[in-house]
Image (cartoon, grey):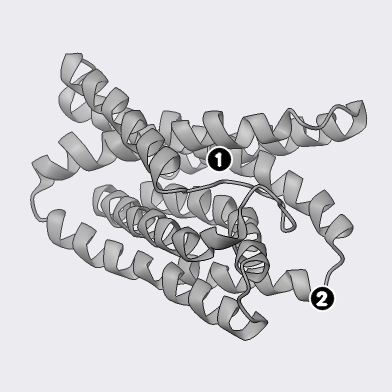
Amino acid sequence: MVVSLISLIGALTLVIKIDKLKKVLILFVSFSAGALLGGAFFHLLPEVVGQIGFGAKTGTLLIGGIFIFFVLEKYIHWRHCHEPDCEEHPHHLGKMNLVGDGLHNFIDGLIIAASYLISIPLGIAATLAIIFHEIPQEIADFGVLLHSGFSKAKAIIYNLLSASIALLGVIIGILLGKNNELLTLYILPIAAAGFIYIATADLIPELHKETKMSKSLLQLVSFIIGAFIMYLLTLME
């Protein structure tokens, strides 16, 4: 539910100047990159390796997961622009953006459900990683809908409906979780691959656009904090 409500944060673009918002968002992007990698390497992958080892099957699932996320981004226009005034999106892609975002949120729901079924700390780690990734993305999605001709009210409503699909992912994830082998063998490795792909293919390249040393150092600190929080959560297990 919290992940779905994050979609409402897009309305911040209506009350906060874009320039000020960008300065805050880039820190969320760097924090999210660290949190996603920390969630993958400190929580998801150790759980998978502990259950089934790290052999060819695990490696195949990880590569397959990265391929799945690549295809989603490449052909369903699941864009990860993290600026609210991003011009990267053609105006006619507003509806397609909703479809891609809905699919993305469904996968988020699956990951969250699968993680909590393994352990509460793992669930918390996955939820935090996803939330901090969603904040800049939902603000960007809101901007895309406005640029595509949606009214402010419709942009908020449709973004919330798209985000609510995460709840469907949670429900299906819980049902699938009754088969623990399916959970460990398939959902968690693919989830880890998704975290790694998003962090390395989408978020980190976004951070490289900043060349000023002082701001780059802030990004680095935010990145480390994100990863460190994921590490601290391992102490709860």
Image coordinates of residue 68 in percent, x first then y, are 31, 36
Residue 176 visible in the picture: yes
Residue identifier under label 2: 15
Looking at marks 2 and 1 on the same chain, the residue that comes earlier in the sequence is marked by: 2
Q: Nearer the viewer, residue 35 or 97?
A: 97
Image coordinates of residue 99 in percent, x first then y, are 40, 61
Image coordinates of residue 102 in percent, x first then y, are 40, 62
Q: Amino acid at mark 2?
A: Val
Q: Residues within 10 Å of mark 1 (few under 14, many from 20)?
A: many
**Count the marks: how many?**
2
Tell me the quarter of the image containing the N terminus: bottom left
**Considering only vertical position in the picture, is 50 above or below 156?**
above
Q: Nearer the viewer, residue 174 or 195?
A: 195
Residue identifier under label 1: 35
Is 138 situated left or right of 22 in this image? Answer: left
**Considering only vertical position in the picture, is 80 above or below 145?**
above
Tell me the quarter of the image containing the C terminus: top left
Task: Tell us which disc is closer to us: 2 or 1.
Answer: 2
Task: Check disc 2 and report its element: helix, strand or loop.
Answer: loop
Q: Residue furthest top?
A: 56
In which image quadrant can residue 69 be found? top left
Q: CA distance from mark 2 to mark 1?
A: 28 Å
Q: Nearer the viewer, residue 92 or 113?
A: 92
Residue, x 25% and y 47% (percent of image)? 118
Residue 48 — which label? none
Is 131 situated left or right of 59 in this image? Answer: right
**Considering only vertical position in the picture, is 113 above or below 17?**
above
Residue, x 62% and y 85% (percent of image)? 153
Residue, x 75% and y 57% (percent of image)? 85
Q: Amino acid at mark 1?
A: Ala
Image coordinates of residue 232 in percent, x first then y, are 54, 39
